Amino acid sequence: GQQVMQIPQYQHVQEGEDFTTYCNSSTTLSNIQWYKQRPGGHPVFLIQLVKSGEVKKQKRLTFQFGEAKKNSSLHITATQTTDVGTYFCAGIGWEYGNKLVFGAGTILRVKS
Amino acid sequence: SAVISQKPSRDICQRGTSLTIQCQVDSQVTMMFWYRQQPGQSLTLIATANQGSEATYESGFVIDKFPISRPNLTFSTLTVSNMSPEDSSIYLCSVEDYGEKGGYTFGSGTRLTVV
């Protein structure tokens, strides 16, 4: 079954609204990564979080890694139409054979 | 980060035939990864391709169905054999980026439709 859970599956927001997607692993991770896949495109690496409680920002995007290194979130402030796509979290952990395991993804649609 | 050239970008194939997908990386890498992304789904790892040894397959994937070649440190192929409509998916190769930022780079994907 899915080892890295991600919610929500789908979110449709008005341009300018905020958006958050959450990721939860059944086991402790050594790191968690976030990817964006535009419609018809391939996954593009956004960021990697390694440390417990780590927070990183990229312009309007804020990424967090939980204290227990089992959960993570991506928050987008004031969404724009260019944010449209599917956001995947992907974790690496010893119990996953140190391989990248992807969450189900959150599809973001933005109404202008 | 690495740059990957993947081809073909898409193909429509008859059931029972085979398709070979190629990935060329602009730098030498120890491992290359092959993923499948079924329509509307997430990415599932098929196998890890190491140069000079047999690929390592994940549960649910077998060498007879998805033979992989890794002749050198910059190139790999994945063949989808004896295709059925259930094999219709996007297939992607990937390599790890060992730079400061980390993460993995993906090829542009091969969109396969089996009819």
Image (spheres, coloured by chain):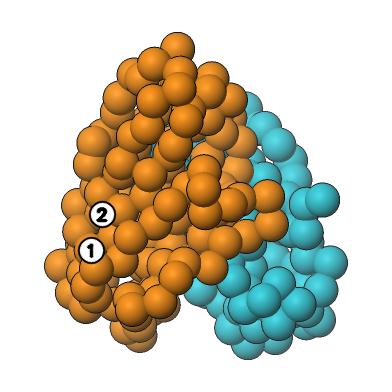
Which picture quadrant has residue B86? top right
Instruction: Judge whether A66 appears above or below B69 on screen.
Output: below
Q: Note the chain letter of the cyan one.
A: A
Classify 10 Å Cα crowding around label 2: few (below 14), some (14-19), many (20 and above).
many
Q: Between residue A21 and residue B51, name the one nearer to us.
A: B51
Q: Which mark is residue B63?
A: none
What kind of element bears circle 1?
A: strand
Q: Between residue A39 and residue A102, name the one nearer to us.
A: A102
Q: Note the chain letter of the orange one.
A: B
* Residue plotted at (20% across, 52% down): B5
Residue that carries the numbered disc 1 in the rendered image: B75
Q: Which mark is residue B23?
A: 2
* Residue plotted at (43% across, 62% down): B33
- From this viewpoint, which residue is outermost toward the top? B115
- Tell me if I can see residue A38 in this picture: no
Position of B81 with respect to A100 (left or right) is left
Q: Where does residue A52 sit, x and y in percent of width and height?
A: 70, 86
Q: Where does residue B18 sit, x and y in percent of width and height?
A: 37, 32
* Residue plotted at (54% across, 20% down): B85
